[in-house]
Amino acid sequence: MTERRRLRRRWLVAGVAAVVLLAGAGFGWWWRSVHTPAELPASACWSVLTRDDLKPLAEHVQGTFVESRPHDADEHLQPHHGDIDCVLRRRSGESPGKSLLWVQVDAQPDFVWKDEYGPDARSSGPGVNRLDFGPDVQGWVGPKFVQLAFRCDNPENAARRFPYATVGVRPGEVTDATSEKVHRAVLDIALKTAKAVVADFPCSNPLHLPDSVPQSATNFPPPGP
């Protein structure tokens, strides 16, 4: 074998090795990007929620999620006329705008509570059922959301004649809303947020919230078509 052929073979072997190394590196990067767990904040939504509260929502989800509260710069969870929101979104540059969780807290007047939550109120659509959180809490549960309402006597709300507080929770676009784990996490987050409203606002009226989500409240309606 001539020296030229040996040199050509060496270059060929080196080229094949380089291609294999590059392919392996690319596969490794793809594997890590697909299987790396989502990065979640240690504390979110008025410091009410922890990373453990959010983890069930982020199974099979990648990216870094950060908190966005567009209508409220205050750390205190105090519902007034006009909602306060907390949204967990993917960080800019990582499919921005895709959310993991949405939480809304609001105050409502008597007539809205009667129309939307009172004994004669009707569900807002198919697959939306009454939510059983005990006699002091009214609410609705749908395939992809939970909504709670309860009386919260507070001087500021009384002055505005908005004596009811509402808590709404829904999973975001990247979350599997049909998952049983997600359903339970949404219920837990709604109850935890309601308790934080009662303590932080605070609500002066006697109000009983369950220690944990009642079993009767865990049966979400089946997802629609």
Image (cartoon, rainbow, N blue to C red):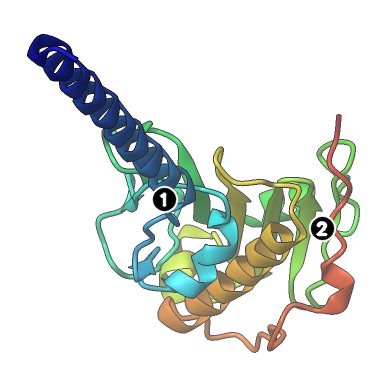
**x, y (%) of residue 24?**
35, 38
Q: Residue sitting at 66 percent across and 46 percent down?
A: 176
Quarter where residue 207 is shown: bottom right
Q: Which residue is mark 2?
A: 118
Provide residue 61's location: percent of width, then percent of height.
Answer: 51, 48
Q: Which residue is mark 1?
A: 88
The numbered disc on residue 139 is: none
Of 139 and 66, nearer the camera is 66
Q: Is residue 101 left or right of residue 41?
A: right
Q: Within 10 Å of the Cα at label 1, are there few (<14), some (14-19), or many (20+) other Cα atoms?
A: many
In the rendered image, the vertical position of residue 128 relative to residue 27, given as above or below: below
Please state which amino acid type lies under the numbered disc 1. Leu
Q: Residue at x 53, y 86 (%)?
A: 204
Q: Nearer the viewer, residue 15 or 136?
A: 15
Q: Is residue 22 visible?
A: yes
Q: Position of residue 102 (x, y in %)?
A: 51, 49
Q: Residue at x 41, y 68 (%)?
A: 156
